[in-house]
Structures are given as structure tokens and as C-alpha cells.
Image (spheres, rainbow, N blue to C red):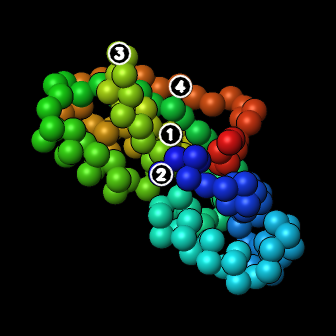
Amino acid sequence: MGTDKLDKTDLQLLRVLQQNARMTTKELAQEVNLSTTPVFERLKRLERDGIIKKYIAILDAEKLNQGFTVFCQVKLKQMNRDIARNFVDVIKGVPEVSECYNISGNYDYLLKVHATDLRAYQSFVINTLGGIESLGSIESTFVMEEIKQSYGLYF
């Protein structure tokens, strides 16, 4: 379902929720100039249709001593369906990896990794990634400063 199936009120609701997902139905209704019942029904439809995937709290990695951020590009020795599935299954279970993308280009995957410091990241590379038999090579890019972090979508 694309945005062509959503009306302007649905889109407005999504924009408001991206700014504050803790708003009550009553507060949301005031923002979009509807009563609470249609807003509640719209939210349930957006959730049921998978447009709203989930509600989360965005944490401050620095304050939780996980502010050492690394983008790690991974190349597998070879690629086929079983090897890719195995790699993805392993990565899904690794708490240090907050994001993982299958990418095109010289590497197969891009990982966003959070660690306490360089030593913790080194341990992650050696003990976690190093334990993946299909791993071919990695390239690490260390984040020096986060300029923009936005979880919202523009539409």
C-alpha cells in the first residue's frame, strides 16, 4: 500500500505520530480535527495494514555508554541463498548491531554497530563477526560526530 491509498488525514496522523508516538488518541484527534473514535479506527487500520510497524522509545546511546558508533561493511566469501540466510540469522541475534542492510556495490551488507569503545568494537569484530564462517572481509567507518538522526519518513 502506497501513500496513494492514504488520505490527507491519515498522512497528517502519521506525521504527528512521528514527532510524538505517546500522544493519546484524544490529543491526536485534536491535532487532526477529528473525534477520537475515527482517529482510533484509523490508527488500528494503519497498524493492521503494516504502515505503522511498531512504537518504540529512542534511547540516547551516549548516556547508556553505547555511543561508540561504527558503520561496518561486510563482504561474504561467496553469496547464495543459504549463506545469506545464515548471515542474516546470526546478525539478527547480535545486540550490538542496531541496523543491517543488504547493499549493492563492493560489499554485501552494511551494519550499524554500537559499542562502549574501540576495544569493545574490536572484541565484536574478532569474537562475533570472526565467528561467521562465510565472512570474507570487513571495512569499518567510525562515526566522529552524529549530525542528523531522524527516524521519520518524509511524504
Identify the residue under disc 2.
1
Q: Secondary structure at mark 3?
A: loop
- Measuring from the top left, give residue 104's x and y in whole percent: 37, 22
* Helix, strand or loop for disc 2: loop
- What percent of the width, then of the height, locates residue 68? 61, 41
Give, as a three-letter code, the residue at label 1.
Lys
Q: In 3D space, how far apart are the residues under numbered discs 3 and 2 (Cα atoms)?
A: 32 Å
Specify whether 45 is left or right of 33: left
The numbered dot on residue 5 is none
Q: Nearer the viewer, mark 2 or mark 4?
A: 2
Does 131 sit left or right of 15 as displayed? left
Q: Residue at x 42, y 41 (%)?
A: 100
Q: Going 18% across and 28% down the picture, which residue do you hit?
A: 79
Sequence-wise first label, 2 or 4:
2
Q: Residues within 10 Å of mark 4 (few under 14, many from 20)?
A: few
Residue 34: x percent and y percent? 80, 74
Tell me the element at label 1. Answer: strand
- Residue type at mark 2 is Met
Neighbourhood count class around disc 1 (C-alpha, 10 Å): few under 14, some 14–19, many 20 upward = some
Position of 123 relative to 65 (above/below) = above
Residue at x-position 67% and y-position 56%: 7
**Mark closer to the chain start, 1 or 4:** 1
Q: Is residue 120 visible?
A: no
State which mark lies toward you, 4 or 3.
Answer: 3
Label 1, on which residue?
Answer: 112
Marks 2 and 1, Cα distance to the nearest angstrom? Answer: 28 Å
Marks 1 and 4, how far apart at CA: 10 Å
From this view, report whether residue 112 is shown above or below residue 89: above
Give how far across and how far down residue 73 sits, in percent. 41, 27
Disc 3 marks which residue?
Answer: 106
The numbered dot on residue 141 is: 4
The reply to whether callout 2 and callout 1 are in contact (CB within 8 Å) is: no
